Amino acid sequence: MKFFVDTAEIADIKELADTGLLDGVTTNPSLIAKSGRDFMEVTREICGIVDGPVSAEVVALDHAGMMREAEILRKIADNVCIKVPLTIDGLKTCKALTGEGTMVNVTLCFSANQALLAAKAGATFISPFVGRHDDNGFDGLDLIRDIRLIYDNYAYETQILAASIRHGVHVLECARIGADVMTAPPAVIKGLFKHVLTDKGIEGFMADWAKTGQTI
Ligand code: E4P
């Protein structure tokens, strides 16, 4: 499973990229606002840190406006992936852009039928929001399961990018189901490295090693 980080914070992106385990980055207008950075400038900087896809979201709601914004955003770098909302205009834009060889991430997906439409529109990635689905009394992981089943039924190449990931259990279950990618905040990804028994084990080994008086 590919790991994308869901942030526009450069320090976090650099730290995770340094592990060699980061496959891409997703941003959205809220994350850009939170960063306090200029959209174009921060997107350019992120694209220079990671080789993989960097999602940059359009803010126009009509097809012509989305195409105009996508034209500007895709010039930033070769690894820019245009993010469009799951609306009729968004999917029209998706079809047009992927037809021209531009990567597209269709975002704000909350039903398997929406995901089916995105695949038919040739989306590179579909982003079902697991956590926000859970927040509203649905099972976000069931959504990932349904999309996996449907995409496999028809051998759609659209990659399932599990988004709105809130904790390690979401990551684990998405991997079990076979999501192609998951995007999570930096803290969730950093949390995956941790286990209390790993820390305890290191502590014990270090204490015993010190007793030997040896060095390597
Ligand atoms: C996906 O690309 C979105 O940016 C993101 O995962 C939304 O997550 P949230 O529900 O935590 O805001």
Image (cartoon, rainbow, N blue to C red):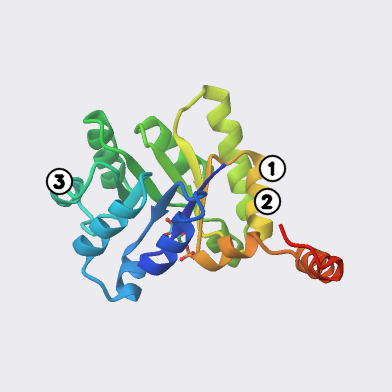
Residue type at mark 3 is Glu
In the image, residue 51 sits, relative to residue 171, either above or below, namely above
Does residue 26 appear in this view? yes
- Whole-percent x, y for residue 29 in the image: 31, 65
Give the quarter of the image for residue 26: bottom left
Determine the CA span between mark 3 and mark 2. Answer: 37 Å
Q: Are marks 2 and 1 in contact (CB under 8 Å)?
A: yes
SS at mark 1? helix
Q: Quarter of the image for the N terminus: give it.
A: top right
Nearest the viewer among 64 and 169 is: 169
Q: Is residue 176 left or right of residue 161?
A: right
Mark 1 and mark 3 residues within 8 Å of each other at the beta carbon: no
Residue 117's image quarter?
A: top left
Q: Is residue 215 left or right of residue 17?
A: right
Q: Residue at x 56, y 32 (%)?
A: 150
Disc 2, SS: helix
| Viewer can see residue 9 | no
User: Can you tell me whether the CB of the residue at mark 2 lies under 8 Å from the nearest atom of ligand 1?
Assistant: no
Three-letter code for the amino acid on which mark 1 is drawn = Arg
Q: Which residue sits at x=26%, y=63%?
A: 42
Task: Read off the residue under disc 2.
Answer: 172
Residue at which label 3 appears:
71
Q: Residue at x 64, y 56 (%)?
A: 170
Pointer 1 or 3: first along the chain: 3
Percent of width and height locating residue 113: 49, 40
Local crowd size for mark 2, using a 10 Å CA cut-off: few (<14), some (14–19), many (≥20): few
The quarter of the displayed image where residue 193 is located: bottom right
Q: Which residue is mark 1?
A: 176
